[in-house]
Amino acid sequence: MKNVIEVTELRKNYNELTAVDRISFEVEEGEVFGFLGPNGAGKTTTVRMLTGIIKPTSGRISIMGFGIEQDPIKAKQLIGVVPELSNAYNELSAWNNLQFMAELYGVSRGVAEERAEKLLTKFDLYDRRDHKVKTFSKGMKQKLTIAMALMNDPAILFLDEPTSGLDVRSARLIKKMMRELNNAGTTIFLTTHYMEEANQLCSRVAIINHGRIAATDAPEKLKTRIGGLEWVEISFDTHVSVSDLPDIPQVLEVRSSGDKLQLYTDEPGSTISRLVDYARSTDRTIVTLNTLTPTLEDVFIKLTGEGRAG
Amino acid sequence: MMVHNIPDQVRRACAIAKKDIRIYYLLGPVIIFGILSPTFLFLAFMMGRDLPVDFLIAGLMGMTIFFASTSVAPVIAPIETQSRNLERIAAAPVTITTVLLGDVLASVLFGIAISFVPILLGMAFGVVVMHPLTLAAGIVLATFCFSAMGLIFSAAPTSVTSSVMMISMMVKFPLIFVSGVFIPISDLPSWGRTLAMFSPLTYITDLCRYSFQGADAGYYPVLVDLGALAVFLVIFMTAAIKLHEKSLPERL
């Protein structure tokens, strides 16, 4: 597989602040590459540099062999960009937004009209094609923004938090679209906060923290990096708080998750025995008992040092 | 695929102009500063004065072209900065020059369209256009020149339209009084005539006087007027490109 994105020693300074600090990575053709990181880690700054919206302070970005600074027009011609917040023109109709994008990318009128019809139909927007975008809901705007990014049939699609704040149906539609595009050969560069989304969609992920890449690998390989530790998840028939549980030496961390308790341990077997003993001794019934292997979120937490919610 | 060529970029500039026309022509600031301001300013000047109609129409013509052509471009950049549409444009395969050319084209077409109002008004009052080709050339050149001037105002790194319009009006109003719109250049004191040379509005007003009132009414030769407008166009466009290149990162 050849690399379609090559990033070398990329850096971006804003006055004294280094937002992105000499990062390097490659994205292979046909990959869904996830770019993960906490807020302020440098994800959006990186995407904006990769897509030629802002200039790097130093370093090099190559898009299918074209330097984004040296050959910006050729590089941009090959990509589609979906920003976190919709930037469709509110005063134009959905149809006119799509046609404008086609004209900006030099797509012929016949192809543009055919493509616009297909995309609007696919995103359930065809009936609203002549309505101004300002009358659209957030989900509809986001779907239109993706359709706009696809009008030039890009070889690489950049999506910045594409499902953020969307309802379940719209989010699922967008994830399905990403899979279909990827199956058809489009390389996808996805930034997301949703670890499960990255886990489901990405063939490789990079985790960025404080402007530096902490790790780059396939999600499953990353999980093995923090291997040896598992979660034991248990729920009882009556409420048990974290402080009610006995001290179990092998347990490194306990947290509550809804009506369940999750225990982070390197010895799940003995931990389960202790929990069963506890249930017997307190005359409680165990409703569910599961062991969970590390998730991508665990990898993320470990590598970024972020506090875990919930 | 060779995409970075001039005809291709010009086609994309036309797409930007079409978008601008659809979105910005009927915006409040464009109507207020492009049409209403020159109309009321002119009425305020004209009321109670006994001046020849052809003199008045020539002045109105120059001022209308000036205000109309400088009213569209300044609203585009701040609005697109605020709505994040600028980010969309910045990610597209177009150069800054292409984007600015698109904005200029939209502004030029607005200026040309509005210039028909004083022409038709003059014809209704019996004014004859003696040199239509000169007038046409002057209108086209002046609308390009003033549109490029409008782009300079919009280079301010702000997303507040009123700030840009305020800067614009601070420059535009003084120019009206030193450009022979209300008082012929020949009647200005020597310092006024010197100042007038540095105003692009002087030259289109002079061309309008020549076109409506005849050869004797022109202060400068026609070629000087056209040449000066062309020089101002080059200066304004070059400055606009440089300023926008500098301010764009601050607006993204």
Image (spheres, helix red, strand yellow):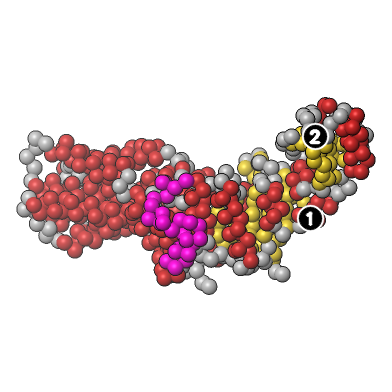
Of the residues tagged 2 and 1, which is closer to the observer? 2
Seen in the picture, residue A87 relative to A278 is either above or below; the reply is: below
Seen in the picture, residue B17 relative to B190 is either above or below; the reply is: below
Where disc 2 sits, the SS reads: strand
Type of amino acid at the residue the image marks with label 1: Glu
> Which of the chains bears the disc numbered 2?
A
Where disc 1 sits, the SS reads: helix
Disc number at residue A220? 1
> Which of the chains bears the disc numbered 1?
A
- Residue at (86%, 29%) from the top-left corner? A283
Type of amino acid at the residue the image marks with label 2: Phe
- Other-residue count near label 2 (Cα within 10 Å), few / some / many at <14 / 14–19 / ≥20: some
- Residue at (24%, 55%) from the top-left corner? B113
> Could you say where residue B162 lies in the image, as x and y percent from the top left?
38, 37
Is-magenta flag for residue A129? yes
Please indicate whether residue A79 sits to the left or right of residue A107 in the image.
Answer: right
Q: Which residues are magenta?
A: A113-137
Q: Look at the image and tell me whether residue B229 can be seen.
A: no
**A115 vs B213, nearest the viewer:** A115
Predominant secondary structure in magenta?
helix
Q: Look at the image and tell me whether residue A16 can be seen.
A: yes
Seen in the picture, residue A283 relative to B141 is either above or below; the reply is: above
Please indicate whether residue B142 sits to the left or right of residue B208 in the image.
Answer: right
> Could you say where residue B124 lies in the image, as x and y percent from the top left?
8, 52
Is-magenta flag for residue A222? no
Farthest bottom residue? B1
Residue with the mark numbered 2: A236
**A46 vs A309, nearest the viewer:** A309
